[in-house]
């Protein structure tokens, strides 16, 4: 499972498995990876959670996955449509 698929699995688990959710990965020149999570505006509050607890947990899990698979630093950006 790639890091994009893993992140998409986590986000869909929180946001009721909506098929509109997409995750795209962009490699930066300093060996860091940016994951862009595209979600509907109605799910943005659910994904972030109260005081940012949900997105912080997702960032922690994705960072641990990246560390175990030697992917380097991972940044997660949330974009809504």
Image: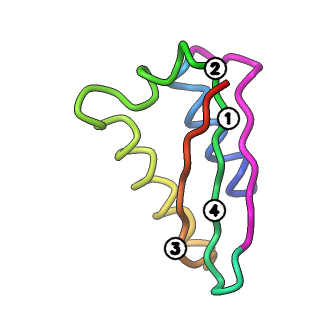
Residue 39 is covered by the magenta coloring = no
Residue 34's disc number: 4
Between marks 4 and 3 in the image, the one whose residue lies nearer the viewer:
4
Q: Give the SS element for disc 1.
A: strand
Q: Position of residue 75 (x, y in %)?
A: 53, 62
Residue 40 tag number = 2
- Secondary structure at badge 2 equals loop
Label 4: element kind: strand
Q: Is 19 on the left-hand or right-hand side of 61?
A: right
Residue topped by disc 3: 67
Q: Position of residue 1 (x, y in %)?
A: 75, 53
Q: What is the span of residues highlighted in magenta in the rendered image?
A: 16-27
> Residue 7: x and y, percent?
61, 45
Under tag 3, what secondary structure?
helix
Query: Which residue is located at x 68 percent, y 57 percent?
Result: 3
Residue at 61% x, 29% y: name it. 80
Q: CA distance from mark 4 to mark 1?
A: 13 Å
In the displayed structure image, the side of residue 46 where residue 51 appears, left or right: left
Res. 38 mark: 1
Residue 25 sits inside the magenta stretch: yes
Check whether the beta carbons of the residues at disc 4 and disc 1 lie within 8 A of each other.
Answer: no
Q: Earlier in the sequence, mark 1 or mark 3?
A: 1
Say which of 54 and 9 sits in front: 54
Q: Nearer the viewer, residue 39 or 64?
A: 39
- What whole-number distance in Å separates the C-alpha atoms at marks 2 and 3? 29 Å
- The span from disc 1 to disc 2 (Cα, nearest Å) is 7 Å
């Amino acid at each position: 499972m790639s890091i994009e698929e893993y992140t998409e699995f986590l986000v869909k688990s929180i946001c009721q498995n909506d098929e509109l959710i997409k995750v795209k990965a962009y490699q930066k020149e300093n060996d860091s990876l940016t994951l862009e999570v595209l979600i509907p505006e109605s799910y943005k509050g659910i994904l972030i959670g109260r005081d940012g607890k949900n997105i912080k947990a997702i960032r922690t899990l994705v960072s641990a996955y990246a560390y175990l698979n030697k992917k380097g630093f991972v940044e997660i950006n949330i974009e809504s449509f």
